[in-house]
Amino acid sequence: MTAPEIRTIGVVGLGAMGSGIAQLAIEAGYATVGREVSDDLGERARERIAHFLQRKVDKGTLGVDERAAALDRLSLTTSLADFGRCDLVIEAIVEDLGAKLALFSELETIVRPDAILATNTSALSVTEIAAAVSTSERVVGMHFFNPAPLMPLVEIVQAELSSRAAVDAAYTVGERLGKRPIRCHDTPGFVVNRILIPLVNDCLRVLDEARVSPEDLDTAMTAGAGWPMGPCTLVDLVGIDVHVHASEALYEKLREPRMAPPPRIVAMKNAGLLGRKSGRGFYTYDS
Ligand code: CAA
């Protein structure tokens, strides 16, 4: 396949990751269509993006006019039909294989035949997601890291049937978004999560083994290992539910005991302690 020149990007799902990706796209000059299931959720994402762009204006790293122009490039919709004009659609919905398969098979009937479809999945198989469409060569992984506007990496994931053109086009978009893209194949956890998930799970097991507090564990890993944030702060940021789900998905594929989520954080998830987004995880948050 020949990849189109990417001018318009669609983002499906404007939660923490999707809104961060949409923010990157409008800042990089792309016309961007963001889709949420309700107008309210869409507006909430726009406000979040507007807030972070305002912080950049306050700090002098973005002009007032540039902020306004970036926000003008964002259009919100609740309808997938609006992705008909997109050259690239990036999916950032819930990490549920069934939901992703249904979305991709619907997207295939809407987007142009040469448009690229990307998934931001962190722990599911891109190849399995691509199987939902008859034109699997146009499906790739574009895995961003949380918080997407701040973390420089994007993993460009080549699934079993991804075409070279689609992978190259996604890589070029990653560069234009200001990221440091890397190429990898579709193996469980790709590169970073294959390493980070068991490592963070080890950290969480040490909480009980060494009877150390979350604060002290975080201090240990920031002050002793040079991590930018401690593991408890990190899983609160990523979302306890997201971390448990990613651990379970990797454990299912690899059967390595270190991948399995420690019981303590499964219990937290079941109790609704989801981290920052629910106001409480290892720590308590204002909003
Ligand atoms: N979106 C957009 N902008 C944001 C943001 C967000 N979510 N969060 C913060 N910002 C902006 C804010 O405007 C903030 O400034 P103000 O607080 O003054 O408004 C500005 O960025 C700078 O924020 P910080 O001062 O908090 O930045 P920092 O220098 O402390 O770095 C960090 C923050 C980059 C997150 C750093 O702590 C870090 O690298 N942490 C590790 C994060 C990490 O490992 N992420 C990977 C998670 S794993 C994953 O994502 C994989 C997966 O599949 C689940």
Image (tube, grey):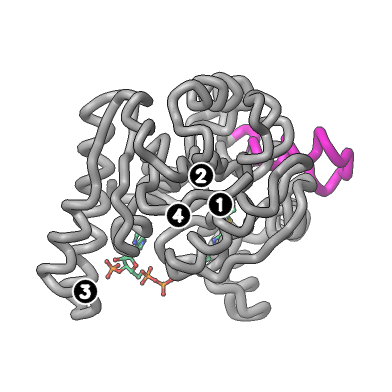
Q: Which residue is mark 3?
A: 62
Tag 3's secondary structure? loop
Q: Does the closest atom of ligand 1 sit within 8 Å of the Cβ of label 2?
A: yes
Quarter in which the N terminus is drawn: top right
Q: Locate residue 192: give its quadrant.
A: bottom right
**Residue plotted at (35% across, 37% down):** 85
For marks 2 and 4, the one nearer the N-term is 4
**Relative height, residue 57 to residue 29 (above, below):** below
**Residue plotted at (65% across, 65% down):** 182
Residue 213 drawn at (x, y percent)? 60, 59
Q: CA distance from mark 2 to mark 4?
A: 35 Å
Label 1: few (<14), some (14–19) or many (≥20) C-alpha neighbours in 10 Å: many
Amino acid at circle 1 = Val
- In terms of depth relative to the viewer, which is nearer, 32 or 19? 32
**Residue plotted at (42% across, 35% down):** 12
Label 3: few (<14), some (14–19) or many (≥20) C-alpha neighbours in 10 Å: some
Residue 167 drawn at (x, y percent)? 64, 54
Task: State which mark lies toward you, 3 or 4.
Answer: 4
Q: CA distance from mark 3 to mark 4?
A: 27 Å
Q: Are marks 2 and 4 in contact (CB under 8 Å)?
A: no
Q: Are marks 3 and 4 in contact (CB under 8 Å)?
A: no
Q: Locate residue 36: give its quadrant.
A: top left
In the image, ligand 1 is in what quadrant?
bottom left
Q: CA distance from mark 1 to mark 2?
A: 6 Å
For marks 3 and 4, the one nearer the N-term is 4
Residue range corresponding to the magenta coloring: 245-267
Residue 235's mark? 1
Label 4: few (<14), some (14–19) or many (≥20) C-alpha neighbours in 10 Å: few
Tag 4's secondary structure? loop
